[in-house]
Image (cartoon, rainbow, N blue to C red):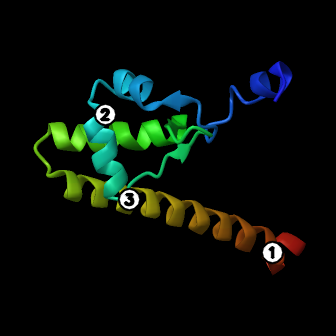
Amino acid sequence: MTADDSFGRLDDDDYPAYTMGRAADMLGTTQGFLRAIGEARLITPLRSAGGHRRYSRYQLRIAARARELVDGGTPIEAACRIVILEDQLEEAQRINAEYRRTAESAKPATAAEDG
């Protein structure tokens, strides 16, 4: 990978740019927390060639939401499930809005508009 390739990925939310230590520092949590949410299958970090976990910005946002819930007293397993359901709901709402836009653009003109 060249330097130009690396710079092109700076804006990529899915690029696994952060080591476990750096991710934990950024989130203000422990590496054990990151391992726990990985075991709960909330996020699956990619692995470097040496086998080290690497996290993307998108994964860090998900981990941060789980941490908010855990800090508020929610058990980690429940927090992970809540975050998964929130993510599924957001995706369903996005798809719904897309279907509505498509349906609206496909509607024929009414008689009053034909005037």
The kind of residue on which mark 2 rests is: Gln
Residue 83 placed where, x, y %? 34, 54
Q: Secondary structure at mark 3?
A: loop
Establish if 102 lies above or below 72. Answer: below
Q: Secondary structure at mark 2?
A: helix
The residue located at (76%, 25%) in the rendering is 6
Mark closest to the chain's N terminus, 2 or 1: 2
Label 2 Cα neighbours within 10 Å, binned few <14 / some 14-19 / many ≥20 = some
- Marks 2 and 1 sit apart, C-alpha to C-alpha, by 51 Å
Label 3 belongs to which residue? 41
The residue located at (14%, 40%) in the rendering is 72
Label 1 belongs to which residue? 106
Left or right of 23? Residue 80 is left
Label 2 belongs to which residue? 31
Q: Nearer the viewer, mark 2 or mark 1?
A: 2
Left or right of 32? Residue 20 is right
Which of the 4 image quadrants contains residue 33?
top left
Mark closest to the chain's N terminus, 3 or 1: 3
Q: Quadrant of the N terminus?
A: top right
Q: Nearer the viewer, mark 3 or mark 1?
A: 3
Q: Secondary structure at mark 1?
A: helix
Mark yes or no: residue 31 visible: yes
The kind of residue on which mark 3 rests is: Arg
